Every structure is written in C-alpha cells, then in structure tokens.
C-alpha cells in the first residue's frame, strides 16, 4: 500500500514539475521576444554564418590575390568534387562559401574597372 502511494506521488510530482518547466520555458520565450533579444540573436547568428573574410576564402581555395577568376573556378570545382565524393558536407559548404565570397570581390573589382 505504501509503495502504491509513493508511486502515485512520484507520478503526480513529475507531471506537476514537467508542466512548471514547460510554462517557465514559454514565459522565457515570451519575455525574450518582447525585448527583442531573441530576434537580435537569430540575426547575429545568420550574419556570422554567412560572412566569410576574403583571406579565409583565399586560404580555403588555395589561391592568391593575383589569381585569375578561371584559376579560382578550377580550384573550386576540384575541391567541391573531391568533397562530394569522399569528403564532408561541412567542407563542401565552406568551399562553396569561399567561392561566393571571392565572386563578390571579383565582381566589385570588375565594376570598379568599368566605372573608371
């Protein structure tokens, strides 16, 4: 009889505790969204994950500042295919981000020479 009462207390107590934790979590989310902290954090994460510095991009692709765009594309294609076959998706995505970063740099340079 005592074991049954103890088991009922444990089950009821865990149910109450679970609901309290869930309500606290919902309240924390509501407070964060009211203050804008959650949105700012998500935006910072998105910005940080998309931005790659030019030196890092050059290092990943193994090219120099004097490399031509064709040379960069060759390196990109080679590294992308190698990682597609037996590499990792993470490395493949880094190679792709590096190419995109350098692509914007070379587009800006091309526009700068056209404007001049």
Image: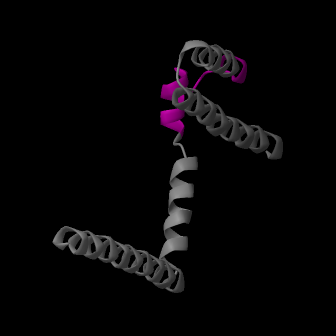
Quarter location, residue 15: bottom left
**Where 114 sits versus 33, above or below?**
above
Task: Assign the magenta stretch its main secondary structure.
Answer: helix
**Where 104 sits versus 88, above or below?**
below
- Which quadrant would the N terminus be assigned to in this image? bottom left
Q: Residue at x 48, y 35 (%)?
A: 56
| Residue 66: x %, y % from top left | 59, 23
Q: How is the image coloured?
A: one colour
* Residue nearer the viewer, 114 or 100: 100
* Residue nearer the viewer, 41 or 76: 41
* Residue nearer the viewer, 38 or 79: 38
Q: Residue at x 48, y 78 (%)?
A: 26
**Where 45 sits versus 86, above or below?**
below
Query: Farthest residue in the right direction?
Result: 114
- The part of the chain drawn in magenta is 54-71
* Residue nearer the viewer, 101 or 7: 7
| Residue 116: x %, y % from top left | 79, 45
Query: Farthest residue in the left direction?
Result: 2
Is 53 situated left or right of 18 in this image? Answer: right
Quarter location, residue 99: top right
Q: Residue at x 69, y 41 (%)?
A: 104
Q: Is residue 28 magenta?
A: no
């Amino acid at each position: 009889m005592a074991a049954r009462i103890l088991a009922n207390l444990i089950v009821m107590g865990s149910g109450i505790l679970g609901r309290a934790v869930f309500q606290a979590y919902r309240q924390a989310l509501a407070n964060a969204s009211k203050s804008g902290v959650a949105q700012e954090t998500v935006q910072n994460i998105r910005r940080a994950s998309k931005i790659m510095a030019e030196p890092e991009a050059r290092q990943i692709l193994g090219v120099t500042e004097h490399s031509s765009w064709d040379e960069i594309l060759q390196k990109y294609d080679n590294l992308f295919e190698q990682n597609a076959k037996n590499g990792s998706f993470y490395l493949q995505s880094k190679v792709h981000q590096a190419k995109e970063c350098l692509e914007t740099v070379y587009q800006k340079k091309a526009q700068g020479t056209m404007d001049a």
